[in-house]
Image (cartoon, rainbow, N blue to C red):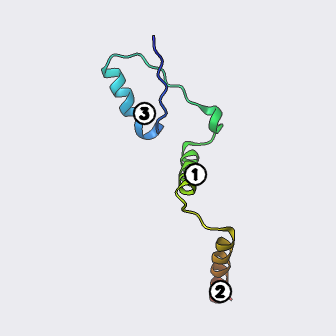
Amino acid sequence: MTTITVEINKEQDLPALEAVLSKMGLKFHIEEDDDEWGNLPESVIESIKAGLADIEAGRTVSHEEAMARMSKVLSDWREKNG
């Protein structure tokens, strides 16, 4: 027997993968890796992964830039709302 480990997007890929494996007549077992992400909901995990991808791609702003943007938003709000 040979074991293959594949990391997939559970919500997107699992139904198609299960269908293919079943059609091939292969026995399979789905094992979720809760150790890596704890008990976080899938939506939170995907958001974290998206954030990590943004960091790797350089889609970030400095702390100073973020603070300047927020100061502007607050200043604009104060002007409108007294």
- Whole-angstrom CA distance, mark 3 to mark 2, is 50 Å
The quadrant in which residue 33 appears is top right
The quadrant in which residue 56 appears is bottom right
Callout 1: few (<14), some (14-19), or many (20+) C-alpha neighbours within 10 Å? few
Going from N to C along the chain, the mark reached first, 3 or 2, is 3
Residue 9: numbered disc: none
Q: Nearer the viewer, residue 60 or 31?
A: 60
- Whole-angstrom CA distance, mark 2 to mark 1, is 36 Å
Q: Residue at x 62, y 42 (%)?
A: 40
Give left or right: position of 13 versus 35: left
Amino acid on which the number 1 mark rests in the picture? Leu
Q: Nearer the viewer, mark 1 or mark 3?
A: 1
Vertical arrangement, residue 7 with respect to residue 78, above or below: above
Q: Quadrant of the N terminus?
A: top left
Which residue is the site of mark 3?
14
Q: Circle 1 — which element? A: helix
Residue 26: percent from the left, percent from the top? 37, 17
Q: Residue at x 67, y 85 (%)?
A: 78
Q: Circle 3 — which element? A: helix
Residue 81: numbered disc: 2
Callout 2: few (<14), some (14-19), or many (20+) C-alpha neighbours within 10 Å? few
Which residue is the site of mark 1?
52
Give left or right: position of 33 versus 30: right
Amino acid on which the number 2 mark rests in the picture? Asn
Q: Circle 2 — which element? A: helix
Going from N to C along the chain, the mark reached first, 2 or 1, is 1
Going from N to C along the chain, the mark reached first, 1 or 3, is 3
